[in-house]
Amino acid sequence: MYYMNIEKTIMNINLRPKMFIEKMRIDNLYFLLTGYLLCAQGTEINEEIDTIFRREFNNWSINWILINLDRDFSTEVGPWYYLFQKSAKTEEEAVENFFQASKEFFDEYHKDNSKT
């Protein structure tokens, strides 16, 4: 079985969303990715990047939304899809914001974990 880590999976979903989700909505994307991560958790296919995303992306998103969208969710509790949904005017905007934020999250991850 071939497994892609969460970063590659998100990149592929962004490139060809209809291959993964019939109706692209931020909550559908959340449930797909959460299920994907849960399947890998605790197995040999789980990569460090999967664990970091699962553990840190929600809180990281709160800061990203504050800086980039000027919305403060620091006192609210909810999964990342809720944050993106509530900070956008449309589902399409919420999904676009998620893809941009996740790209920046992974860029930061690689910068912080580079061996140079």
Image: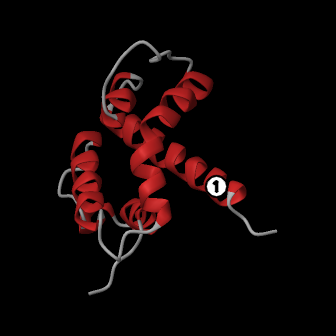
Residue 32: percent from the left, percent from the top?
A: 23, 55
Quadrant location, the C terminus? bottom right
Q: Is residue 14 above or below residue 28?
A: below
Quadrant location, the N terminus? bottom left
Query: Which residue is found at the position 31% from the left and 26% from the top?
Result: 78
Decide if residue 110 is on the left or right side of residue 58. Answer: right
- How would you rate the neighbour count of disc 1 (Cα within 10 Å): few for under 14, some for 14-19, many for 20 or more? few
- Residue beneath disc 1: 107
Decide if residue 97 is on the left or right side of residue 22. Answer: right
Residue 65: percent from the left, percent from the top?
A: 52, 27
Of the pair 45 and 21, the residue shown nearer to us: 45
Of the pair 54 and 28, the residue shown nearer to us: 54
Residue 12: percent from the left, percent from the top?
A: 40, 68
**Which residue, as the protein is rendered here, is positioned at the far top?**
75
Residue 77: percent from the left, percent from the top?
A: 33, 21
Q: Is residue 78 above or below residue 45?
A: above
The three-letter amino acid code for the residue at tag 1 is: Asp
Of the pair 45 and 62, the residue shown nearer to us: 45
**Which residue, as the protein is rendered here, is positioned at the far left?**
22
- State which quadrant residue 86 falls in: top left
Instruction: Say how the picture is coloured.
Output: secondary structure
Query: Which residue is found at the position 52% from the left and 43% from the top?
Result: 101
Q: Is residue 98 above or below residue 6?
A: above
**Which residue, as the protein is rendered here, is positioned at the far bottom?**
1
Say what secondary structure mark 1 lies in: helix
Number of numbered markers: 1
- State which quadrant residue 50 falls in: bottom left
Of the pair 41 and 93, the residue shown nearer to us: 41
